[in-house]
Amino acid sequence: MGQWMRQYGTTIKGTKAGDIKPQYWGATTRRGNHLFVHVTRGNVPSVTLPLKCKVQSATNFATGEKVTCEKTASGYVLTLPEHTTLPDLVIDLVTK
């Protein structure tokens, strides 16, 4: 747990509940203009977020790699990386 907190602690410490209530795939937390998407379930190829805010960027918190984020009529669809060790997938959305 200590190692996880050193790497991901800023995605939960000092945050508030995210814009999306907990879902089957995980949960979200928010700090300022950062919405952290915590994916805790495997075999989920994508996550749809019915957000009212605008997403400016989406990155894998651990690696800094860009995550595909597409605006649709349902909200924003994040295409999740194929090779992810759960529960360590946190996506950082910068919102406006």
Image (cartoon, grey):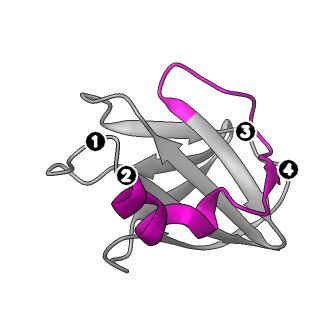
On screen, residue 55 above or below 40: below
Q: Residue type at mark 2: give it.
A: Leu
Q: Residues within 10 Å of mark 1 (few under 14, many from 20)?
A: few
Compute the Cα span from label 2 to label 3.
20 Å
Q: Which residue is mark 2?
A: 89
Contact (Cβ within 8 Å) of mark 1 with mark 2: yes
Q: Which residue is mark 3?
A: 50
Q: Which residue is mark 4?
A: 52
- Is residue 71 found left or right of 40 in the rendered image? right
Contact (Cβ within 8 Å) of mark 3 with mark 1: no
Compute the Cα span from label 1 to label 2.
6 Å
Contact (Cβ within 8 Å) of mark 2 with mark 3: no
Residue 95 numbered tag = none
Q: Residue type at mark 1: give it.
A: Leu
- Residue 54 in the image: state x and y as whole percent: 77, 65
Q: Which structural element holds mark 1? A: loop
Which residue sits furthest left? 83
